[in-house]
Image: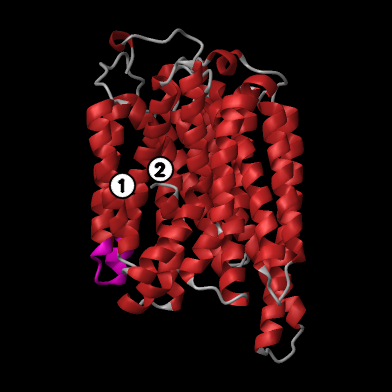
Amino acid sequence: MVVLDATIMNVALPSAQDALDISDADRQWVVTAYALAFGSLLLLGGRISDLVGRRASFMLGLVGFAAASAVGGAAQNFATLVSARVGQGVFAALLAPAALSLLTTTFTDPKERAKAFGVFGALAGTGGAIGLILGGSLTTYASWRWALYVNIVFAAVAFLGATVVLPKIPRGARPKLDLAGTVTASAGLFALVFGFARAETDGWSDNLCVYPLIASGVLLAAFVALQRTLARRGGSPLLPPSIVKDRNRAGSYLAMLVVGAGMFAVFLFLTYYLQVVMGYSAIRTGCAFLPMVAMIVTFSQLTNLVLLPRIGARVLITLGMLICALAMSDWTTIDARGDYATEVLPGFLVMGIGLGLVFSPAIQGAVSGVDRRDAGVASAMVNTMQQVGGSIGIALLSTIAATAAEDRLGGRTPTPALMADAAAHSYVVAFWWACGFLIGGAVLVGLLLRPGVPASVAHGAGAPDKTPTPSSSR
């Protein structure tokens, strides 16, 4: 629900724009508002789940997300719809870390834990594509409003399941909330996502792009300094430096950042290509992504249950990123004629394999070995890296694609055929750049991750301590 809402409104947006009379200048904020709230508040949401309990945070996040979705579905104007999307982002920032940290602390049997992380990794990788499929289906056969209302159904089922399945575990000692770290991290991440969002729509020279990015650099540098100082003094930093100093976790976070950038760019450019160049409908575009979804689900389970305990994360994640780069290179053959079977489908299948190899090991590596009192904020970092990566990737590659399209037109009078050719060429250039990003990221991740199979994977342990009893954990 959380991941698919990052893309579900992309397909429903044209219908919502017509219904609510939203201007072209404002329509992007329906998508951006969610990303801003979600990305900037994730670390705070993760720490809140450590403070008040993961079950309570999870259930509160579900209720809030459903309520915001109901308001958005019933919106009669632009302001209400954007406010609802902000509300969704706020509660998603509480819900997502709680969900992953619950998974981390609940499943301790090696086989069950492998299955759980395989399912979670598959959903993390397919959520964006499922959002496109669902958004297209609901918009075509019902209304754009159901792209929001559908979350009420998801949340109700999850809330019922949480009530029945999740145990009430007494809280132990709780870390204090780092207010200075919270303010600098949230403001820094907000400025970062906002700056890249403005770059995508208004260009890199726009003041509302440049100044937020500068402010983001200052704020995040201040955040790092505050966390190191607080850790030295024995305090409770929002993000303990020990979490990101571990090579395996640092490599896993970097993998989520780079793959997130490439993945969301795929959803954006191939959606444009299928609809603008090939003339697909919204629902047909969504269904075109199904082969990739199937491959991600299959290989996520295969990776966690069979490959990870034998090969280790370093080989799998690095190989997966290189396979994703191979998929990007395959899409550099697309042209204005457009043929799904030969130009698009093979890349979808290859990309699905690559993402299936990356997501489950990276997510498990990002939260394994973390002290249980910090499981929430460590889980939040997974979502933060994916969200920030998506914002960076879309902004950078959109700018590269726009420049390539202008160069292709070369000042000539645009005709439908020429515009289609320029669009296809711009996507090809963007895919080459994405391919390079993934190869460079694979090299860095391979250098960071330790070789071999960590004990936490081999034995299913989520933290260095023993599995706690309900009386000693949250």
2 or 1: mark nearer the eye: 1
Does 434 sit above or below residue 308? below
Query: Where is residue 27 shown, x and y percent of the image?
Result: 42, 71
**What residue is disc 2 on?**
41
Q: Is residue 57 left or right of residue 312?
A: left
Residue 353, picture quadrant: top right
- The amino acid pointed to by label 2 is Leu
Q: Are marks 2 and 1 in contact (CB under 8 Å)?
A: no
Q: Observer-nearest residue: 161 or 392?
A: 161
Closer to the N terminus: mark 2 or mark 1?
2
Secondary structure category for the residue under label 1:
helix
**What residue is disc 1 on?**
154
Q: Observer-nearest residue: 418 or 78?
A: 418
Q: Residue at 67% of width from left, 90% of height from top? A: 415
Query: Where is residue 331 shown, x and y percent of the image?
Result: 72, 60
Q: CA distance from mark 2 to mark 1?
A: 22 Å
